[in-house]
Image (spheres, grey):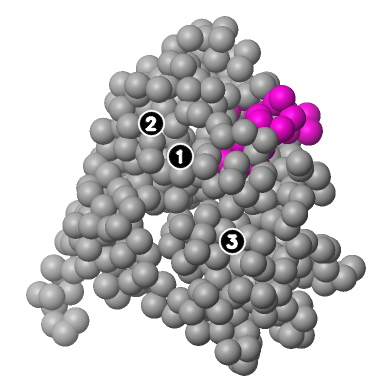
Amino acid sequence: MVDHAVKRHRRSDVSRRNVLHGMAGTWGALGLLGSIGLPHTASGAGKLALRMAGYKFDRLAALVDGRVGVAGCDVTFEQAAIGDMNTDVFSGAQTRDVTEIGLHPFMLAYANEGFRDYTLLPIFPLRMFRHRSVFIRNDRDIKRPEDLRGRKVATPGYSSTSLTWIRGILEDEYDISPKDVEWIVARNDSSAKDAGKVSQQENVFPKGVPIELGPEGKDESDLLEAGNVDALFHAAEPRAFIQRHPKVARLFPDHRAVERAYFAKTGIFPIMHAVAIRQKIARDNPWLVKAVFEAYAEAKRLDYVYMAKSAWIFGSLPWYAQELEETRALMGDNFYSYGIGPNRKTLEALFRYSHHQSLAKRELTIAELFHPSSLDLIDQAK
């Protein structure tokens, strides 16, 4: 079924310095808050050595830089790219105890390869709406999603989490089947520096879908720029779009409005990455699953505080505060939620998409993928 292939005068000047001084005090307080409830003893004394990996997203920064620790652990945190983290876990040296992982690659390894060395925790470091990820040639008369039927579409990883979401959304919302498109899988990826090398589980090709490999030495942007394909689905911003190629555009120019409407309709905020923990270390240390979950949640809470109190002045976006307010109004205060409860519908949608697209051999369940002791954990960050 499956083949593996983000002064005017002195008084105003003094006032501004006071604001900045207050912000610095807030940062210091956040650093202290990150240590609350996390016992600290002499390095290594009675602590579990824990090797972790992931991106330094804003919501993880306090964990990466040590302001937040994992209770009872001496943490070493390595920054790494997702493709490389996937490969390390599924077919590499398995050098990390806790690691960020591509959600769909993990699903495929579990369902199709019998992979059981790690289990998932309901921590989701990366979520992203995916209407923004559909790029087109603007000279091919593609005005709406339905115009993709019969077209050639490039991608650097057919079975990646992002591509599985895009295909599922297109079928659910616009009645476009994966079989309606001719897929060209690029051999190179213009975003490889940030994403890492595409893992084996991100290039699973299902039978019955027209898929072929692109030419040697060409990445997905080369194919779109040269006109070899009509469209491109890509998890990242492809080089052709970043460099503003005159013939490359988004299918959904106002993707923010489309994505907000999608969330209002479905309640789904697509999950890209999860966190995996080595089965043995979780089994030998039953308290560890909760400790890791609480550390990630606390790091995110500190980011929420920073976003509300300080980011509007230190960030570069002119309407940062309004964007945050509008996001909370639509999605709730804890819009980047962890835990099974608020994410059940989103997870089950991806499980359904994977099986329906002939990627996973069967439709997976939450109970089998996630560690049993994590199923009832509640993320109260906001």
- Magenta segment boundaries in residue numbering: 90-115
Mark 1, residues whose alpha carbon is within 10 Å: few (<14), some, or many (≥20)? many
Is residue 178 a member of the stretch shown in magenta?
no
Report helix, strand or loop for mark 3.
loop
Whether tag 2 and tag 3 are in contact, CB under 8 A, the answer is no
Camera-nearest label, 1 or 2: 1
Mark 3, residues whose alpha carbon is within 10 Å: few (<14), some, or many (≥20)? some
For the residue pair 330 and 72, the one nearer the viewer reads as 330
Spatial separation of the CA atoms under disc 1 and disc 3? 21 Å
Residue in the image at 46% along x and 44% along y: 349
Q: Is residue 282 visible?
A: yes
Residue in the image at 64% along x and 67% along y: 180
Mark 1 or mark 2, earlier in chain: 2
Mark 2, residues whose alpha carbon is within 10 Å: few (<14), some, or many (≥20)? many
**104 shown above or below 94:** below
Q: Which label belongs to residue 347?
A: 1
User: Which amino acid does the dot numbered 1 rest on?
Assistant: Leu
Whether tag 1 and tag 2 are in contact, CB under 8 A, the answer is yes
Is residue 112 a member of the stretch shown in magenta?
yes
User: Which amino acid does the dot numbered 2 rest on?
Assistant: Ile
Camera-nearest label, 1 or 3: 3
Q: Position of residue 203 (x, y in %)?
A: 74, 50
Residue extending farthest left: 11
User: Which amino acid does the dot numbered 3 rest on?
Assistant: Ser
Camera-nearest label, 2 or 3: 3
Q: Which label belongs to residue 177?
A: 3
Q: Which residue is mark 2?
A: 340
